[in-house]
């Protein structure tokens, strides 16, 4: 079946059950104004779809925040996005071997800097680079002032003091050629997520999260995002949730 048709039909199943499917959109690795970022922001604005922009605090330029429109809110994408993984460990800014106090201090300084730049746009949420974070840090995040956490995949055990809302569909093929995963693969992933939540196989209290990386998008990825925003606008009841709504509810 055509993926776009499958998406519309899944939306109709939600409607027939008197329910509304929910999505949310996070884009990672923002640092400075670029043509790719401008294209991302234009898509969010023209389709009136909320965008959670995960910004790297210690690399962020003031001009970046000045470019953001009304549909965009800011999350904290780690501190400096530097890979500190040990040999054999998957990429992470926050490796298990790093002393908790060192990571804690780096996060705190980065949070203050980003808050100063982004002001009211900053939703106090940590989206760790590579979606990885030492488990030892989790119990201390609320003490730094964070309200939420956003990673990738199914939510794990609840973190005291934090609301976790993750992303579930990454449209970049990082392990292959770092290009677009393909229209059918992306649509299949979205439909599977929505169907799983509707049927109770997945957590229906969490919206399906779209994860993009504007700096890595090829032409096909951009075409897909634009068509997705257009198509979902015409699915009765479907709602794109903002980070403000999700983490301050």
Image (cartoon, rainbow, N blue to C red):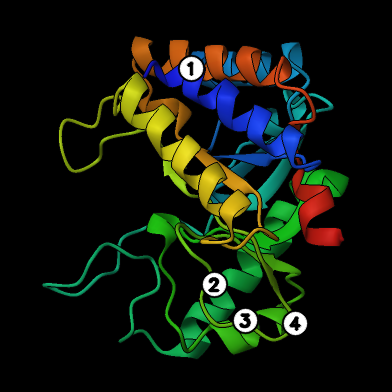
The picture quadrant where one finds residue 165 is: bottom right
Quick one: label 2 or label 1, which is nearer the N terminus? 1
Q: Secondary structure at mark 4?
A: loop
Q: Secondary structure at mark 2?
A: helix
Residue matched to label 1: 4
At x 56%, y 19%, the residue is 228
| Spot occupied by residue 78 in the image (x, y as percentages of width and height) | 52, 60
Residue situated in front as seen by the camera: 103 or 152: 152
Residue matched to label 3: 158
How far apart are the alpha carbons under marks 4 and 1?
A: 39 Å
| Spot occupied by residue 51 in the image (x, y as percentages of width and height) | 68, 34
How far apart are the alpha carbons under marks 1 and 3?
A: 34 Å
Q: Residues within 10 Å of mark 1 (few under 14, many from 20)?
A: some
Q: Quadrant of the C terminus?
A: bottom right
How far apart are the alpha carbons under marks 2 and 1?
A: 44 Å
From the viewer's perspective, is 195 left or right of 116? left
Q: Secondary structure at mark 3?
A: loop
Quick one: label 2 or label 4, which is nearer the N terminus? 2
| Spot occupied by residue 138 in the image (x, y as percentages of width and height) | 56, 82
Which residue in the rendered view is the most extreme toward the left?
A: 88
């Amino acid at each position: 079946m055509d993926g776009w048709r499958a998406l519309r039909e899944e939306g109709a199943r939600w409607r027939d059950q008197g329910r509304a499917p929910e999505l949310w959109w996070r884009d990672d690795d923002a640092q400075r104004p670029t043509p790719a970022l401008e294209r991302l922001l234009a898509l969010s604005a023209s389709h009136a779809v909320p965008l959670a922009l995960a910004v790297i605090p210690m690399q962020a330029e003031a001009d970046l925040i000045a470019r953001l429109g009304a549909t965009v809110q800011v999350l904290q994408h780690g501190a400096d996005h530097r890979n500190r993984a040990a040999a054999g460990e998957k990429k992470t800014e926050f490796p298990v071997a790093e002393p908790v106090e060192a990571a804690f201090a780096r996060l705190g300084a980065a949070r203050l800097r980003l808050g100063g730049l982004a002001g009211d746009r900053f939703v106090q949420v940590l989206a760790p680079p590579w979606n990885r974070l030492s488990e030892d840090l989790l119990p201390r995040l609320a003490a730094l002032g964070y309200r939420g956490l956003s990673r990738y995949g199914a939510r794990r055990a609840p973190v005291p003091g934090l609301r976790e809302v993750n992303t579930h569909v990454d449209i970049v093929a990082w392990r292959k050629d770092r290009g677009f995963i393909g229209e059918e693969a992306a649509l299949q992933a979205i439909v599977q997520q929505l169907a799983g939540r509707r049927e109770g196989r997945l957590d229906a209290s969490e919206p399906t999260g779209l994860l993009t990386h504007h700096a890595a998008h090829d032409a096909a990825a951009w075409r897909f995002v634009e068509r997705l925003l257009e198509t979902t606008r015409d699915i009765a009841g479907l709602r794109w949730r903002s980070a403000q709504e999700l983490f301050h509810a």
